Every structure is written in structure tokens, then in C-alpha cells.
Amino acid sequence: MATALALMCWLVAVKCADAQSAGAAGKIGAIHVQGQKMLTAEQVIAATGLKPGQEFDPQQLNAAAERLGKSGAFSDVTYSYVSQGGLMAIDFKVEEAKFRACHFDNFVWLSDDEMNARLKNELALYNGMAPETGALLDEIPGALERLSKEKGVAVRVSRRVQQNAIGDPNWSHMYVADDADVKVQSVRFAGTINVSADDLQNVVAGMVGREYSAFKSALMGSLTIQPFFSERGYLRAHVDTPAMKVVSHADATSQFAVELVYEVTEGELFHWKAAEWKGDTLLPAADLDALTGMKPNDVANAKKINEGWMAVKNAYAKRGFMDAQILPEAVFDDASPLVHYRVTITGGPLYHMGMFTVTGAPAKIAERLAERWKLKPGDAFDGGYPLEYLNKEAAPALRGVFTRPPKLGISMVPNRTQHTVDVTLKVE
């Protein structure tokens, strides 16, 4: 894609040069750029390799436009030039491509500031971010390898896509020193902490002795350590991105041992106060309270609280409200300290039973399975019934029918227009 883009830009550049006398002579005067947003005009000019005062050559302009296109930083590049006072004034018009943040994962011998400074110095179009594709992405590893070698560490650097989940639209570039041997020697916590130190160390025990990754270490803080506190009632605990300290380094090698320090602000230990229910409260408040599984003055366990909201959602689904939304808003009383939730429920439309279908089974067996399905077309749909049917009706009905137990699966497909749900039992 980058090559095709570069070719397009180059063809446009040739056309401009041909149209304005490819045989023109003289020296380059002023160079102007328009259309850039994230980048400065100075960066774009530096990337062209052209300088005022050098001999003017239309072929050099074509080559400069081609370099800009191949960099990946621009989705479109054109130029024009005109004689002004015996010098050739050049105007580039560019349209920037999409840029992504750049992160550095395991370069423990370098700081982010050092790496960014070197990259900005060597690569005119680097500004802490880089385009999604193009030659610039391939130039960054080389610069990092040279900088590392100056520090006495020989490594091979590669680029990966960093994303918090598959399909995450906010992905970024991650540069990794593949040959580095960086191990986590220890993990400790800073701050005033009341939870069990032993329990906290057990949470991070799996990190010790493993390869160090800044990205994974940060995720450990947000996805594992933070929930550890919130499940113990510290709902407003904050875990900083861990600080990293090199504790040993084998000379003239890429072998390092590091310590990670997580700074924790634990906050108050909160207890539960009954929720306020608003909106489509089809169930009595007492029933909704019971579904949360929480009682007054219980430790406010975030995991249990979230399971309670799911239980409420499932209760609405059992009554046919498949699109019900449960929107809790935490209200903290630091003086108590208690937390209660203002919960707004939006029931949405009532769904009814559509078609029930069996696939993968002989006709007689499919008929037997269909007879055991109790919901009839038009009945209010019970979102909990399909799983109950699978375990209590379908599985027993097929026991001994096949030489080996079949795999069973059940799917629900809602029709958002007619507000019906079609159910399919799959026998494999």
C-alpha cells in the first residue's frame, strides 16, 4: 500500500515538473509547505533533503516527493515551483496520513526521553508518533539499534502492534528489543497499604523471574492489582504505572535484572448501602436488592457488585426484556465511609419467542428435541430458558442415542425490528 501511494505521489510530482519546464536552471530559493497539521513545515522540508542555495534540478524534486510518499506520513504529495528573482521557489502541498503513538517496551538501558530525542534528531518526520505504514516505521528500529550499541547493548529491534484487545481501534506502535534478556527480579509496593502484604505479593508472584515488558507490567497494574483492591472494598484505589529500576547488569551483554515498584493510593475502605432504583423498575426494590447479593454494611466488593448488576439484567431477560440496560452511578460518602448506587433501569421492548430449530440431528431425534422445547411462538421470551433447556432437556434426551456423546450448542438471534428471538439447537 505504501509503495502504491509513493508511486502515485511520484507520478503527480513528475506531471508538475513537466508542466513547468523540466529544463529550468538556477538555484533553489525559498521552500514552502502547506497542508501539514501534526508536523511542522521545517520537518517536512528537512525530510525532502532539499535546501535553499543548492542547484535546482527537477529530478531532485521528483525524488523528494517520492521520499515523502514512501515515508508513509502523507496520503498525498504535490509540488510546484516558480522563478523568483533568479531563484526557484518551491511549494509542497501535502496531506498527512493517520499517525499512531510509539511506545518502547523493554529498553531498560535507555529512557523514553533519550529514545525520543534520538529519533527526532535522526528522523525528520518523527514527532513521538509515526504513520500507520511506510518507510519511517522501518527506519525507527535502526536508529534504536544504533543508540543501544552506543550504550554497549547490541540488540535487534522489531515493531509490533500494541492493543488492549483484539480489534481495538486505538492501537499504537510497540518497539521491542528482541535479543534483550531482561528479567523481573522483584516486585514491591509503595504507599500506605492496609491489605495483606502476603496476599498482594501472591498476586504478582507470577511476574518474578519472567521477561520484563513495560506494556505487560502496566496491564498487570490496571487489570490485576487494581481489581485486587476494589474487590476488598477499596473502590477508589489507584495504582500508578510501575517504576522500573535496573538492579544488575552483566557487562557487555543485554542481560539485565530489574525491580518494579507499584505506587498505590489505597483510599478509604467502603461498605455497602442499599441502592436507589429508578426507571423501569418492573420488580419491587426488595427483589432488586436481593439480586445484588449485597447486604447493608457488607464490604463493597466491586466484583460481587458487578455480578449483582448482571443478575438484575438476567432477571429482566427472563421476563423478555432482552435489551434491558442497568446503569449504576456510585455515590461515595467518605465520612461513613459508605457507597450506594443510583441505578437507572431501561427495560426496552418486550421480546417474544420466534422459531425453534434443531440442526445436525436426524429428523426423528430433531422432532423429539423440538417437543421438549416449552416456549411457543408468541410467548414472552425467557432469556434464561435456553441454557436450562440445554442442560435439563436436550442433553438427557440424547443420552445413549449416539455412539459417543454429541457436542451441543444453542444460539439466540434477536430480531430488533419484530422483537422476536429465534433459537437454534446445534447437534455435532
Image (tube, grey):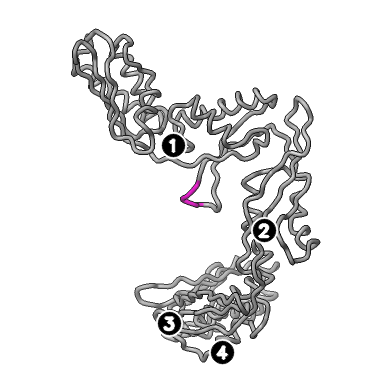
Q: Residue at x 77, y 57 (%)?
A: 201
For marks 2 and 3, give the one nearer the viewer: 2
Q: Is residue 310 visible?
A: no
Residue 383 as seen in the image, left or right of residue 240? left
Q: Which residues are magenta?
A: 167-171
Q: Amino acid at mark 2?
A: Val
The quadrant of the rendering that contains the C terminus is: bottom right
Pick the residue in front: 22 or 55. Answer: 55
For marks 1 and 3, give the one nearer the viewer: 1
Q: Quadrant of residue 264?
A: bottom right
Q: Whole-percent x and y of residue 18?
A: 21, 17
Classed neighbour count for the residue bearing mark 4: other residues with Cα under 10 Å, few (<14), some (14–19), many (≥20): few
Q: Whole-percent x and y of residue 303?
A: 63, 71
Residue that mark 3 sits on: 352
Residue that mark 2 sits on: 264
Q: Quadrant of residue 144?
A: top right
Pick the residue in front: 60 or 44. Answer: 44
Structural distance between the alpha carbons of marks 1 and 4: 54 Å
Q: Amino acid at mark 4?
A: Asp
Residue that mark 4 sits on: 287
Q: Amino acid at mark 1?
A: Pro
